[in-house]
Image (tube, rainbow, N blue to C red):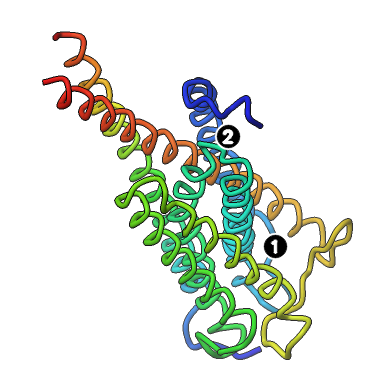
Amino acid sequence: MMHEALDQWTFVIAAYAIGLGGTAALIAQSWLAMRKAEARRDRARDKGREK
Amino acid sequence: MHGFANPARFLRLAQWLAPLLLTLGLVLASAAMAWGVFVAPADALQGETVRIVYLHVPTAWLGMGGWTAIALASLTELVWRHPLAGIAGRAIAIPGAIFAAICLATGSIWGRPAWGTWWVWDGRLTSMLVLFFLYLAYAALADAARRDGEGSSRIPAIFGIVGAVNIPVIHYSVLWWNSLHQPPSITMGQSAMAAEFLVPLLVSTVGFSCLFGAVVLMRMRAILADQQAEARLRRKAMAA
């Protein structure tokens, strides 16, 4: 195994920062997109009922 | 299966299943990663970098599992014309691409101290990179098909089935060709890993699978809500 000048923990932290950041962003974007789309659908339904 | 062909019935199921999977996934994945990073021992050869495995392996399996699900949804759409199958395929594409990208990035970060290089063009790494591009191509095709109308949804479905040829290539690449990547440590009913590494890895995999499922359900709900809103606005415009 090659010995890095950098501490091995630096690689572990970098991997988790990318992995957890990507997963959190994916969950947040999916949640917001769902809420936005469902609010738009409900608005369209309410407008239909008003008529 | 056709019991869920009714979007209203599917939405009733997804309304409680998505938050349940999200909560379960967050608890299990966080616990497994905390266990892997702070409690599990370092490996005799890999040292501390073995801790990356609790993130890298679940994302690799889900990257491959995601495309397998796209292929099954595509087949269901083409053969049985299930109305939710195409929506499921579209909902899986972006999470699958992101998990494949995380797998590639974490593998590369692990490879630098372990192999002495960030990247090699060997069978496993290259076929995983191809999977990432397949996801992007599928997402673009599905988006184009949505704009063109329902008739063209056959093209992404055919692409989803043809692209599945890459899944066994990824799996067997480390056995078919010489590779820096190690052969599978876990096979059906057998594991070369000690329990202190294996247990947090399996818990992490279950947790990330729940998160993946929750994200796919949320994206399916978003696509269905968009379709319902557009249909209502179209009806309203025609009535006016």
- Residue that protrudes farthest toward the left in the picture: B240
Q: Which residue is mark 1?
A: B41
Between marks 2 and 1 in the image, the one whose residue lies nearer the viewer: 2
Q: Position of residue B178 (x, y in %)?
A: 73, 91
Are discs 2 and 1 located on one and the same chain? yes
Say which amino acid is labelled 2: Leu
Q: Which residue is mark 2?
A: B24
The 10 Å Cα crowd at callout 1, few under 14, some 14 to 19, many 20 or more, is: some
Query: Judging from the image, what secondary structure is the residue with disc 1 in?
Result: loop
Query: Judging from the image, what secondary structure is the residue with disc 2 in?
Result: helix
Q: Is residue A17 left or right of residue B173?
A: left
The 10 Å Cα crowd at callout 2, few under 14, some 14 to 19, many 20 or more, is: some
Q: Residue drawn 88% across and 61% down?
A: B190
In the depicted structure, whether residue B213 falls above or below residue B94: above
- Callout 2: residue from which chain? B
Quadrant of the rendered structure where residue B31 is?
A: top right
Quadrant of the rendered structure where residue A29 is?
A: top left
In the depicted structure, whether residue A50 falls above or below residue A41: above
In the depicted structure, whether residue B50 falls above or below residue B108: above
Q: Earlier in the sequence, mark 2 or mark 1?
A: 2
Q: Quadrant of the C terminus of chain B?
A: top left
**Closest to the observer: B130 or B124?**
B130
